[in-house]
Image (cartoon, rainbow, N blue to C red):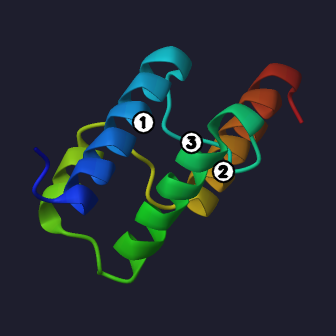
Amino acid sequence: FIWDTLEHAWIEKFNQLRAFKAQNGHCNVPRNDEQNRSLGKWVSEQRSSYKKKALDSDCIQQLNSTDINWHLCYHSWNEKFNQLCAFKTQNGH
């Protein structure tokens, strides 16, 4: 018997995220991915709750264990910057 259905649902999604990461090597689940739309929405909601400081510390700790990227815009910027640096090193300009 499940006493706390919200906690159970959270754990289910968290386990789906772990499986996604095991398969894809990251936790950046696209919200528009037909196969993972529900999971992508859930991850987005977790990030939003985290930014609003409305996410339970236990949830944060568990999500941190997956190396979730809380701030995608910074991650994306850093990724592109690193690509630019590599291009400059390789091509000299």
Residue 34: image quadrant is top right
Q: Nearer the viewer, mark 2 or mark 3?
A: 3
Callout 2: SS: helix
Q: Which corner quadrant of the image does residue 5 belong to? A: bottom left
**Which badge, 1 or 3, comes first in the chain's sequence?**
1
Which quarter of the figure is the N terminus placed in? top left
Label 2 vs label 1, nearer the camera = 1
Q: Earlier in the sequence, mark 2 or mark 1?
A: 1
Mark 3, residues whose alpha carbon is within 10 Å: few (<14), some, or many (≥20)?
Answer: some
Q: Is residue 17 left or right of residue 10?
A: right
Give how far apart the Cα atoms at labels 2 and 1 are.
20 Å
Q: Is residue 22 above or below residue 63?
A: above
Where is residue 48 drawn, in percent x and y? Answer: 47, 72
Vertical arrangement, residue 72 with respect to residue 54, above or below: above
Question: Mark 2 = which residue?
Answer: 76
Q: Secondary structure at mark 3?
A: loop
Give the residue pinned by disc 1.
17
- State how far apart marks 2 and 3 are (Cα): 11 Å
Q: Residue at x 30, y 52 (%)?
A: 10
Q: Which numbered disc covers residue 28?
A: 3
Q: Is residue 55 above or below residue 73?
A: below
Q: Amino acid at mark 1?
A: Leu
Residue situated in front as seen by the camera: 75 or 9: 9
In the current view of this chain or complex, which residue is farthest to the top? 23
Residue found 49% across the figure and 55% down from its top: 42
Report the Cα–Cα distance between label 1 and label 3: 9 Å
Image mark for residue 56: none
